[in-house]
Structure formats: C-alpha cells, structure tokens
Amino acid sequence: MRYADLVSLYLDLEATTKRLEKTHLLARFLKERFSKNGSREELSATLQLLQGRLFPPWDKRTLGMSSNLVVKAIAAAAGTTEEHVKEEWKQLGDLGKVAVALVAKKKQATLFSRELSVLDVVTTLRKLPGIEGERSVETKVKLVASLLTSATGEEPRFILRTVLEELRVGIAEGTMRDALCWAFLNPQITYDMENNDIVFTSEAGRAAYNELITAVQDAYDLTSDFGVVADVARTKGVAGLRAITLELGKPLRVMLAQRESTVAAAMDRVGRPAALEYKYDGFRMQIHKQGSQITIFTRRLENVTKQFPDVVASVKKHIKARECLIDCEAVGYDPASGRYKPFQYISQRIRRKYDIAKMAEELPVELNVFDILYVDGETLLKTPFKERRARLREVLPRDVPRKVRLSAYLETSDDKAGEAFYKDSLAAGHEGVMVKALSAPYRPGSRVGTWVKVKPVMDTFDLVIVAAEWGEGKRSGWLTSFTLACQDDDGAFVTIGRVGTGLKELEQEGGVTFRELTERLKPHITAEHGRDVALAPAVVLEVAFEEIQQSPSYESGYALRFPRVIRVRDDRSPEDVTSIEEVRLAFEQQRRG
C-alpha cells in the first residue's frame, strides 16, 4: 500500500474533531484495503502507524530521535543549513510543516525519487533503535533524511510526526476499537454523516452491536495489540475474538479501580462482605513466570525485567508454580531503617540503564502480590476474587518480608473494622485501601465498580503536561509553569489547569526539580512562541488539589484549586491519565460533601 494513501487518511482525520466521523473514515479505509486483501504484516504496520508508533506498547525499543536530530535530517534532505531549518521552525511552529516546505523546494531540482510504501516507512524507521556506536547520530540522520528525500506532498510532515511520536490525528483507543468492529465484523448499523450519529435497525441490533464492541475490547485488553485483534476479526470473526486468551510473556492491560471518599461507601458499592487490601505507594508490576524465565511489565506494558534483578530472583525462589501471571505492587524501602519509601524513590530504578545491581542494593523493593491471573495451564480471569486470593497463597505459601509477600488483607462487613484497617494502612506509610468485591472476576483494562480505592481527603489526579512556560530570573532556563490536561470522552486531551507548586529548585531539597522536569520535557517540545512552549503529551504528573471548580478558562470546563505536584508518574502513559468522567464524579462527590 502506498504511504500516500495513508497520508490522505491522516489529512481527513486531522480535518475533523468528531469522533464518529473519525471512526467512519478509519473503518472505510481499513475495509476497502484489508477486508479481503493485504497481508497481516501490512495490516499490522498500518495500524501501528495510525497510532503514531512503530512497535507494540510492550516493546521497549524507542526511536531516539530528538527535535535537534530531526532538524539535522531536514537540513540534509533539503540541502540547506540547520540554522535555516530552525528559522523556519520558529515561523511555522511545526517541524513537519518545515520539512514539507523545504523538501518540496529541493524536489523541484530533483529528477528521480521512489514512491514510498507503508512498509518502506515502517521498515526504515524500525532500524533506528538498533543504531548505536560512534557514528550513530550521523547514521540516524541519514536514514530519516533518505525517507524525506523520497517523500512527496504532505508525506514529510507525517513521517516526522511519527519519528517524534507526535502524530496528533485523534485516534484514541476507543476510536480504533470501534473502527475495527465497523470494518471487519459487519455490525447492522448505518452512520448518519449529516447528524453525526449511529442509526440502529432495532433495539436488538443495538444490543448485538454492543456485544461486538465488547468482543473487540476484550480481545485488545488481553493482547494489547490492535494488529492481532484486526487480523483475527477479519479472518475468524467474533468467534475468533472470543477465543483469544492471555498469553504468558505478552502483557495484558491491568484492571483499574474507581474512587470513593470513605471505606463505608466503598463497601456499599462492591457489596458486603468485602475484601480490603492496603493500597501501596509503589510501582505496579505484572510478572510472568515461565519456568526459569521471568518477565516484568509495568502498568504501561513496558518490559522492565532488566531493571529489577532482585524481583526476578525473589519470584524464582519463592513463587511455587512452574508457570503463572501475578499482579503486584513493588514498594521501595530504606535498607537501613526498613521504612517504606514513596514511589518517586524507586522511580529512579525504572529509568536506570547502568549500575543496575548497585541501584537494587541502594533502593531495594518489596513485592506485595495481590492477584493471580494464570497458574500452570489454568486461566483465572473469570474466577471470583476470593478464590484467586486462595490460589495466591498456594503459590506463595509463606510471606518473606522485604522480598515478596501477599498484600495485607481483611474480609469484613463491618464499617468500624474497615475504617480501622484503613487507618492502619495510613499509619504504616501507605496510600489508603483497595476495597474489592469477593465474587468479581478480573477485568483486564477495565475501571469497574468491583475495585474501589479510598485515599485521604486531599485527592490527586494523574494529568499530562501539554504546555509550559520558560522561567525568568533565577529560574531562567527552566520550564516553570505547566499546563495540565485530562482525557475527554473521545480520548482527546483537554486542559484542566496550570501548576508550578511542588517542584524544587535544588536536588538536595528532595522531590522533583525544575531542572529534572525541564530535561524530560525538552524532547517533546513541538513549538515555541516567546516564553510559551507547546508540548506533545508525554510526561504525566500526579497532582494534588484542594478543590475542583467549574471554569470556562480551560477546555475541560473545570479547574483545580491550589494544585501541587506530588511526583512524576513514570508508570503512567498519557492514555492512563484521569478521565473527564472521573473529574465529573469527583466534582459531584465534592458538592455532596
């Protein structure tokens, strides 16, 4: 398939903000090209590009192309200087647009260039992570420049957006899910373009459609790969999707919790008696054991096995199953005092590439296991939580403090007992409690009412930074004021406030510094106008606040009063941030008092 065809779709998607219209455009494109033709490889590559990535979410390879390297690539492809490219960047605010303008001028003097295919682009860009060594920068620049030289029309813009992981055409996971259903499962619906609505033939048709959507969602939650889901949908239909199950070694999307303000309210929601567990201030781990092979994935589906050799050793030694998949929280502690440490201390280990063994000694973790999803050939996703907890004790016969243990646990119907357990958790330095329905199955990827978290009154949201402002005076050279966004119902990021409080000026003060956050954000700068900086959504912060207020000043319709940065959430991707629905619920709970 020609890359130009995909670019044409990008432009159509970019031209509308309507989620259903995007779904229609995407579904029509996929159906025309892949329902009867097209290889599995080309289908998978196309879907990856539509999500603005080159690899599945759990593949930890990164392209390693900063804005500065892209400037070099444009200069090489256009036969101009880097200074000229930077001047154009200041004027246009988008490196992709700069490439379109400058490469087009160069092409007027060029007699030959090859037409790019989707596989050309994917195959070339997938070489970038493997380029290392003394001349790696030069080699990467030449590789990207070679694509730009062959690109025509708007192709350079989207090649570079892909390279910078800033596609920005509005394809959220829900849109992709629905488009695959429309394209390959033939639901009995009509898209009314004039009114931007779905027309159902009957109520039975609506129910059947919802079942198809659920089948696609469940398959994605188990595989985390739309390429796999799409290929099964087009070749085996809904029956094939429903036959998909978890596969050891490949991460599934973890189950998430809703919120309540009190233990009693949480128990009322899940049903009594309920299971209560400590809510740890740690790092979510999904651990796959296949004999002696241990693989550790984060909540973001990143493979961090190499960064946690101590966890690998503990699982090998103490988990008594040949094969299993366990859901855990790794909590850092001080090796001298034994006291638990906040998440930000162990977050250093997630990014560590060197001196890993030394870091494991300095910042050890204790594994608190709270669920088991597979054991020795048996999938436990549909097994009630109470039974899964019993199976956990079978694979971990005894707790090994400071190595691996089951999460602190209480079954009760009593409000006083639940409240006392909650206070014990806080006194031990943890975040609060999780309240769970004893009869509930494990729902990958879902935030359902059978898991509810309870934390102290000053609540927190996970929000992504989408803009910032350069500081002045003693903070000159640092980004110091950050615009935050949550996710709306269509998966788009909408602003909800600004924050600058909670960051430190000096490293010895502890916590996240302005310098550290600035360095993290620099590769994601997409445009600068004076002191104002536009950023691709990449870095997630946990932000505390005293109150939610309705506000026309921000796209979400809400603003946070007295926001304060708590920490950088390395374990959260932009797609994991707080949803507008969670904001609405928190606002309503606040109004009710």
Image (cartoon, rainbow, N blue to C red):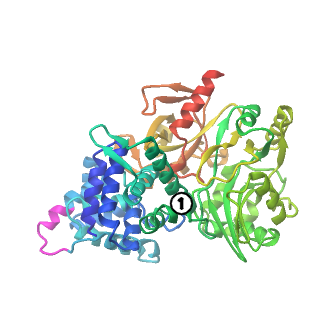
Look at 74% across and 54% down and name the residue there: 331
Left or right of 76? Residue 575 is right
Query: Is residue 106 on the magenta stretch?
Result: yes
Look at 50% across and 45% down and name the residue there: 464
Residue 61 rendering spot, x and y as whole percentages: 50, 68
Is 446 situated above or below 394? above
Left or right of 98? Residue 483 is right
Question: Which structural element holds mark 1?
Answer: helix
Q: Is residue 325 visible?
A: yes
Left or right of 66? Residue 333 is right
From the image, which quarter does the C terminus lie in? top right
Query: Is residue 228 on the magenta stretch?
Result: no
Residue 122 rendering spot, x and y as whole percentages: 37, 70
Is 93 situated above or below 545? below
Residue that numbered label 1 is attached to: 219
From the image, which quarter does the N terminus lie in? bottom left
Q: What stretch is highlighted in magenta?
A: 103-113
Q: Nearer the viewer, residue 432 or 381?
A: 381
Residue 81 rendering spot, x and y as whole percentages: 24, 63
Give the amino acid type for the residue marked by disc 1 in the picture: Ala
Is 289 situated above or below 208? below
Residue 62 rendering spot, x and y as whole percentages: 47, 66
Q: Nearer the viewer, residue 76 or 420?
A: 420
